[in-house]
Image (cartoon, rainbow, N blue to C red):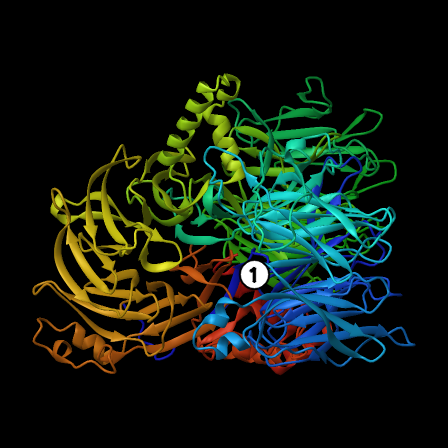
Amino acid sequence: MSNVQQSQAFYSLTLSGPTATTAAVTTNSIPGLKTQDQQIFEARGSRIYLHRVIENEDRTEVKLQQVCEQDTFSIIRGVTSFRIPGTATDQLVIASDSGRISLVNYDAGKNQFKRVHLETFGKSGVRRTVPGQYLASDPRGRCCMLASAEKNKVVYIVNRNSAAEIVISSPHEANSWATLCFAVCALDTGWEHPVFAALEVDYNDAESDPTGDMYERREKMLVYYTVDLGLNHVVKSWSDAVDYSANMVFGVPGGQDGPSGCIVCCEDRIYYRHDKASPLCIPIPRRKGSTEDPERKRIIVSGCLHLSKARHEFFFLLQTEDGDVFKLTMEIAADNASQPERLVMKYYDTFPVAKQMLLIRKGYIYIASENGNGKVYHVNDLADDPEVEPENCFNSDDVSADPEDATAAVYFTPRELKYTSLAVEVPGMHPLLRTKVDNPGNEDAPQIYALQGTGNQSQFKTLRHGLPINEIVSSPLGGVPFDNLWSLKTRAEDEFHSYLLLSSSQGEKTIVLSIGDEVETVENTLFLTSRPTLEAAQMGTDTLVQVHTRGVHSILSSEKTNAWQAPANRSIVAASANQHQLLLGLSSAELCYFFMGDDGILNQLEEMPEMSGRITCLSVGQTPVGLQQAKFAVVGCEDCTIRVLSIELDSPLEGRSVQALSAFPVSLEIVREAGVDVVHIGLVSGLYLRAVIDGVTGELGEVRTKFLGASPTKIYPVGVPGGEAEDGGQQQGVLACSTRPWLGYVYPGSELYTLTPLVAAEAMLAARPFVSEHLNGLCAIQGANLVIFGIPSVEGRLAEEGVGLRYTPRGMARNPWGNVWYVVQSEGNTLSAATKEGLRGKDKAVRAEGEDEAMNGEGEEEVELMEKHLGLSRSAGHWASCVQAIDPVGDKAATCTIELEGNEAALCCAVVAFESREWEVYLAVGTGQHMMPGVAAASVTGEPAKGYVHIYRLTDAGRTMELVHKTPFAAPIYALHAFQGRLALGVGPELFVYDMGMKNLLRKSRGVVVPNQIVSIDSLGNRLVCADVSESVTYVVFKPKHNRMIGFVDDSIQRWSTTASMLDYETVAGGDKFGNLWVVRCPEQASKESDEEGIGGYIVNERSYLGGAPYRLELRSHFFTQDVALSIQRTALVPGGQEVLFWSGLQGTLGMMVPFVSREDVEFFTQLEQLLRAEDAAALVGRDHLMYRGYYVPVKGVVDGDLCERFLGLSVDGKAKIAAEVEREVREVERKVVEMRTRVAF
């Protein structure tokens, strides 16, 4: 049934932030750390991060730790850092779309960024003439420059006053009329006046010359801007023409460290330029190889400088667009320290192509990759020895510095990593091209299937909500079904566990394992093995206590044993203990309480109070640090209640509070978190509850609920990596075991409690901490096995598995009868597999003729590995493409691959069940032939590009594909869709419906429905929705009796659509290439007319309005996300959860729009958003939140959940102030904010 509400409101949340780096810089921002311990300040989308490289003493374990993350709610254009003389830490500078420069510091006490200065210099938004596109800071920390793409530059001088406060000057402008800027850098001039260098083009003459002659004679200039600190102004001090292909500029160290000047990177060449020195030039080496184009010129895309101030030595690492990194050094004249004599360039290694490359003083290189995972490499060697690989070393001798002179090409031989080794891989989801939420294997929760990456580094990924585990040991337990286990220390002060007890209630036995170098079964033990164990604990100093159904068995350090027998006709049904207290629940609903004496003997309290129902579980609180006893215990009864009791010796077993539940509890655990007792409750219905115990009254509050699965929920206390407890040990958390295990812990870097599932092969029955000399992890009973595993990190929320692809993926579809997915892939300007094989065959033949058989022994595996490392072979005008069947569940690999020939490129696909073939399932693939990348409707042959639709028969349960036929079309095919047992496809602006034929597809219907190009098709009933590349969406009705397609409603706004999906019969959600999400709805009158029988109705004869359809869509919601949405889907993300609007973006963002279900929630969160917007008015970079979320169209019908979640990080006073405004308690506001996320997602 369609939605008939007149207005619909959504709550927008980010599930996973963007991973594509905008800008990054090294800094020393954390007080107290050594200068060598640099951090990485990084901007991704609207978020800023501070990372730090952590290593152990022998550098065998290295990780990149996220220190801080903060959302600025702005478009960050650039970041830099500099040290103001006399200060202890670096200043961080952020250039954003707010029209302001922001100076920030890292506040280690609050673990957040703190704004120091915010100065306005221009209009908001990303504009041509507003500075901020380029950002550079003086190496001596005196000033920084912001430049726009056209005309304007401003310089801010930064200093300290007498009170040691940082002061910033008014902006000093350096504007050049009719000038385009391509790059900016700061020169190192020592302590002389700061100088900034810029690459500029003056277009004034070219613009005023109608003949175009001045345009052909335009020049790119290297311009110096000098900041006069005495007169407080900026002047253009020097300019000179450079190669017009110059794209990057780097400052060369000056003063005592070098000659100053700058490195200018151009196509195929690198220049050294300075106003006080002669220019030098060196060519950029090209790759050797049988599949490499010897004429293809390279450019530099990233680079970094290493400067040793102690030795006054420096070098550059420069990377080409292929990923090859070269080390550039200078040889300085002996008699003139300001004149370099020679440039020397040596091939260093090949890394992934970087958006930003940073050299960290600890000896690491950080690669902020343009594609996929970021990398941290350990520098093993600086490649200083000239005798190593002399063939890959080049210099500037005999190379003219005149750009007009021709330069002989030089070549190098690429190889595997030699001077570096991979230390850390930083997960990255960009570019994220397609996603689909599905559950083909009927798992406990749906999975996210994604196409990610470009080239041969791309992957088909399966994302699951959860933390990956590292399984170390898995040992079968035999035929006895064990259901609980405990890990015990011998003495309280021991660091490692000594025993592991496994209990079987069905087999009525307990086995004891000793923990040492190996985990072995103990035959002769003082533990009782003939009965199942209910509880085992180390109590007092060195007493081991084992509770079984008939009594309590104590083992003293002298190896003597004490036994306490349960009262007659009664048995023990539940037990719990801490270091000094033991509580038992009897079958008669009575409680027995014991406390540990100094002699290691348990002393029983005479009173045995009776509960209101049969006891099902209980828990005593952990003993606080520095105390001898816990304050509270919690008892669960079969009457669906839990009771909080006092267990202090002066008021033992006195009731404090009662809480009713929806089902009876089967497991309880009290865990101390941040000095507060928290009770975790597992119910027989699979529900999990968490409540805070008031430290004074014992009342339960802040109750949070989550459904974990269909099985009863059992709770076990465990240690969590990445946090610290009160006693300095591991952070305490819980493992909740239901249909799958869930880890409850406080998320690192925040105070938010998080419940995340573990990605395990089977459900776990029980789990405990496991600490030995060689391992710190967890042990668990998983089915019939005992597993010991570790949790590598708790910082993420998604676990991923990937299957490697050959080329950039363009589309995917799933076989409806299995777990097989079909992925179409294509790569522009890349040699196809057949072409590469032919070139390699020719090369082998040439080598054989030259009797160089030693070079002829490369195996196919070696070639594939090298290609995986170096990337695909490039060549203009060529396309490489294939179609693959992927099994991500069973084989976890491609089961079938079909390479396309004839310079075709696969662009889209769909799985279609044709009614005319008795609903047999086929795979349809849309392609383009002889396309020119980046040029629409053009081809490399000069004629318009063509298209085809390939039809494949699916055999072997869909694991293999066989080509049936292919049908030619006049234009490339960008959209395919299964429609009523036929195939709907878009060819340019036309929509076709085809049926299956013997040798070709058979056309059944045709209609021109959009103005330009159909890029997406979706349908429901006889209604189709076609998304145009630049004209939003059009609703089309198909009249089967008359075989006509009629476009009856379109949009009033030009939207450059990237994705669209029908939410219901009337409503469509979509995204555009400018980062907007929108929901539009068909007017009621137009919808009724379109559904009228026949074609004699009003809708067919209605005249078009303003050159479009007769009616216009109604805009229901609009929201700016700052990421290009490429997939959008209505789906549920958690079992039993509400359906949401899930979307994914190009930069790796995963987000959702949650529909509000009550008007009360809409009003509450709208008011909360307004209050937080006002509270956040003095934001980090000064961007107005309302203007940011309504960048192109004013925000409508959406509440920003990311802003609402800022409430959780406010101070106590800030929370109280806002809670008072919304007339709620702070805890209630926190609960509503948290539940909006956890109720529907993660």
Q: Residues within 10 Å of mark 1 (few under 14, many from 20)?
A: some
Percent from the top left, x then y, of residue 284? Answer: 60, 46
Height in image: 683 above or below 60?
A: below
For image coordinates 82% across by 36% down, the residue present is 601
Percent from the top left, x then y, of residue 708? Answer: 50, 50
Which residue of the protein is positioned furthest toward the right in this rendering? Answer: 162
- Would you say 827 lies left or right of 638 here? left
Which of the image's four quarters has the N terminus? bottom left
For image coordinates 89% across by 65% down, the residue present is 86
Q: Nearer the viewer, residue 510 or 382?
A: 382
Q: Nearer the viewer, residue 263 or 129?
A: 263
- Would you say 779 lies left or right of 661 here? right
Percent from the top left, x then y, of residue 610? Answer: 64, 51
Q: Would you name the residue on which mark 1 appears?
A: 244
Q: Secondary structure at mark 1?
A: loop
Percent from the top left, x then y, of residue 1137? Answer: 43, 58
